[in-house]
Amino acid sequence: MTPLSGRAFGETTLTASEPSWPHDDISTALPHAKRRVHVKDPLTMPQQSSAPTADRPTAVGHAPRPRTAPVSLDGIGDVVDAGRSSGYAHLDARGLPTLGQVVTAARAAAASLHRPTLWPSRRGSWQPAPRSTRRRVGGRFRVTTVALEPNGFVPGPVPRSEGPHALEVLCLVRGRAHLIAAEADGRMLSATELAIDRARVVGGGGGERRHLVNTGDEIAVLVRVTA
């Protein structure tokens, strides 16, 4: 029978020149002789349990926070009630009508000028609207009308330093007309046709000059409402 070597059982042969291992892990022989080292199997060794963790301190309870009152937008007039006082001294409300109110007033003025007897007698210049038209519009609006002969024109809105926030709306009552915007040297920038059933919002911004031109074959009547 062939004797089994120590290598078959997982044993390792070390020489005397090799460093010694701790005595609790290996068994050593004579100092100058060949030594056999027996390595412990970690699977068969009893596992040492980890050190017990220290008890964590319990969380200190906090007193419940008092409930805050729900936020209300009733006091902010610019959000809830447009046009009304907001209740804040630094938010001074301006008594200017809205754009929708000016457009509504211009349409009402145009509807009241359906009779030719209410049209301006003079051609080519803005004139105050009849009293019946101003009464129908109501409010703090300035209502003026103009009648243009074919190919006639009248200056349109111009910059107003005393009222930079003013609103102006044009309505065509009869005929055909265009709003022409041109530079100071006369070069045309744009031409917008006015329709009878639509209001045109204009302003005095920019440095261009504007004119209303009768581009039809009959008298053109327009009404202007300024706020």
Image (cartoon, rainbow, N blue to C red):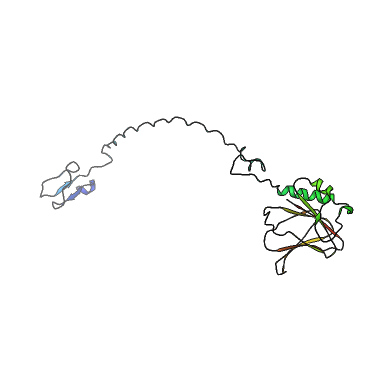
Horizontal relation, residue 41 to residue 211: left or right: left
Identify whether 50 is placed above or below 111: above
Which residue shows up at 81% across the image and 56% down it?
127
Which image quadrant for residue 59? Answer: top left
Q: Position of residue 32 (x, y in %)?
A: 10, 50
**How many circles with numbers are drawn on the protein?**
0
Residue 149, horizontal then vertical, whole percent = 85, 63
- Front in this rendered view, residue 203 or 163: 163
Q: Position of residue 18 (x, y in %)?
A: 16, 52
Percent of width and height locating residue 163: 68, 54
Q: Is residue 190 above or below residue 162?
A: below
x 18%, y 50%: residue: 13
The answer, for residue 210, to whether it is visible in the render is yes
Of the pair 65 and 79, the residue shown nearer to us: 79
Is residue 4 visible in the rendered structure shown here? no
